Image: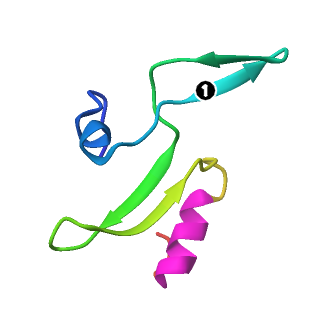
Amino acid sequence: MSDHSFTLADQRGEPVSSDDFDGRVVVFEGLIRSTFVLGPDGEVEHAWRNVRAKSHVARVARELGISEG
């Protein structure tokens, strides 16, 4: 699921992103790229924060014991 309106992030208290440009911290509205696995009750069972897209799917699949594809 994608949370373009930040509704779920606001409910869960997730932080906005910031980046360092030439020694200055610039804060912008957005999210730190995160992945959450929710259980049947809607509670977070697994969380990965500040992830990079490259190889992240493989890591999640490996840690959850499922195959990619």
Which span is picked out in magenta? 56-65
Q: Amino acid at mark 1?
A: Ser
Depth check: give the residue in front, 34 or 57. 34
Which image quadrant for residue 7? top left
Q: Is residue 67 left or right of residue 45?
A: right
Look at the magenta stretch and give its main secondary structure.
helix
Which residue is most to the left? Answer: 41
- Name the one closer to the observer, 21 or 57: 21
- The residue positioned 51% from the left and 73% from the top of the image is 61
Q: Secondary structure at mark 1?
A: strand
- Asked whether 62 falls inside the magenta stretch, the response is yes
Q: Residue at x 84, y 14 (%)?
A: 22
Neighbours of disc 1 within 10 Å: few (<14), some (14-19), many (20+): some
Residue 44, above or below 12: below
Using the image, determine if residue 19 lies above or below residue 42. Answer: above
Residue 28 is left or right of residue 18, and the answer is left
Taking the image as shown, residue 38 lies to the left or right of residue 60, namely left
Q: Give the answer, above or below, for where 68 lies relative to 54.
A: below
Q: Is residue 33 left or right of residue 5?
A: right
The residue shown at (15%, 71%) is: 41
Residue 56 at x, y percent in the picture: 59, 58
Q: Does the stretch in magenta take in 63?
A: yes
Could you tell me residue 1's position as x and y percent? 29, 47
